Image (cartoon, rainbow, N blue to C red):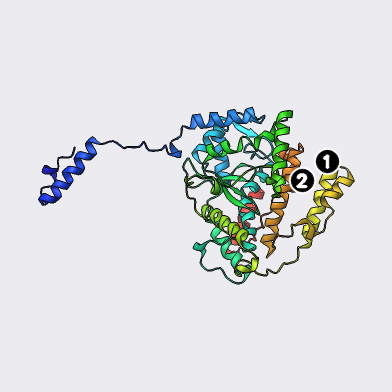
Amino acid sequence: MVDVDRRMTGLNPAHLAGLRRLSARAATSSPSTPLPPRNSLISFTSLSNKVLTHLKNSGIQVQPGLSDKEFARAEAEFGFAFPPDLKAILSAGLPVGPGFPDWRSTGSARQQLRSTLELPIASISFHIARNALWSKSWGVRPVEPEKAMRIARSFLKRAPLLVPVFNHCYIPCKPTLAGNPVFYVDENQIFCCGFDLSDFFDREKSTVFVKCNPHPQNVMKQKQKQVRVNGNGKSNGMLSNVSRRSLDAVSGGRVPRWVEFWSDAAVDHCRRKSSSCCSSSSSSSPDRYFEIPRTGVPNWVDKYVQEIGSVLKAGGWADSDVVDIVDVGSSGFFDSEMVLLDNQAVLDALLVKANRLAESLQKAGWSSEDVSDAFGFDFRPAKERKPVNLSPEVLAKIGRLAESVSKS
């Protein structure tokens, strides 16, 4: 107990009496209810063992974990730091197969890994283009869609990078702490699907990973789940055979850690979805939707689609199958809800579409190298290099240096 009389000599008797009571209470009392354990204090060893054991039991191949050198390479190449809990899992074992990022990839497959990291921003851009998302911290949304998109992209550069965990589920790299929530992000939805990695794998173990196990009983369970999902009339891409849900309806008072931009985006998407369901017509909220002009798709997109067909034919695909895949116009290659405001939007749409096709091919047995060779995945706009103007004196020195090197 603190010696109040000796340390607080300048206080009046009333203050001294109050401090004595507080000091005595702090020395003798104990919390009436134990504090819940924090996510960041969970043992990494038990977490990684539980997750990897579950994945192995689900029929998923688990390779030896990433080394410190492999972690350093990925973090230096892509400019982020692995959250400590995800790093603990990947150091204990590396899950491989459709849906899992190939952190050990080399060569052309490395570009697909980069595209997986760029996919969330490309996907969220379509939410913004459709006026389905706008952060209050960005200020008032401009009326011009192109201007609004430029402002949003500048702010999105500051958002924490999302690290892929499985399919379209990601964990933010910041804050660099254990216990960050897991977000589902695609071009149509964004929501929190796990309070942390442990909670995410607990929720997904009976729905997602069972389809990776070819055992007949597991296949039957997955088909039954698919029938139940489709029976509700809610089919949406990857979610048509997965009963992954947002935590908004099942949180039970528990709140995930707040993450810059992504938490607000998930909450905003939930509010808009609830509002649209309760609304009798879309006209009840006139500022929710507006007419967005669609720009024409560049000719090079059609050429790119034809190149994909050539690679598929070279890989042994039948002509009829290739025609079914790529024999579409540029307007058919992109989904009708994709709003193409500028060239960057076209590149984002290509990345999203190529990722969808890559998922199907990898499920059919294609390797990440084959998929990368087929699609390329390098959809980043080339940076123009400004010409460098050198003074005559510098040019003369360079010439003399080149001449001396050639003579030696």
Residue at which label 1 appears: 315
Can residue 294 be seen?
A: yes
In space, the residues marked 1 and 2 are separated at their CA atoms by: 9 Å
The vertical placement of 336 against 107, above or below, is below
The answer to which quarter of the image holds residue 368 is top right
| Residue 8 in picture, x, y percent from top left | 13, 47
Report crowding for label 1: few under 14, some 14 to 19, many 20 or more residues within 10 A (C-alpha).
few
The answer to which quarter of the image holds residue 386 is bottom right
Q: Earlier in the sequence, mark 1 or mark 2?
A: 1
Q: Which residue is at a point 63% across and 35% down the rendered structure image?
A: 206
Residue nearer the viewer, 119 or 56: 56
Q: Amino acid at mark 2?
A: Ala
The vertical placement of 33 against 408, above or below, is above
Q: Which residue is at a point 62% across and 60% down the rendered structure image?
A: 276
The vertical placement of 96 against 147, above or below, is above
| Residue 241 in picture, x, y percent from top left | 70, 42
Q: Which residue is at a point 74% across and 60% down the rendered structure image?
A: 336
Question: Which of the labelled discs sits on residue 374, or is there none?
Answer: 2
Q: Quadrant of the N terminus?
A: top left
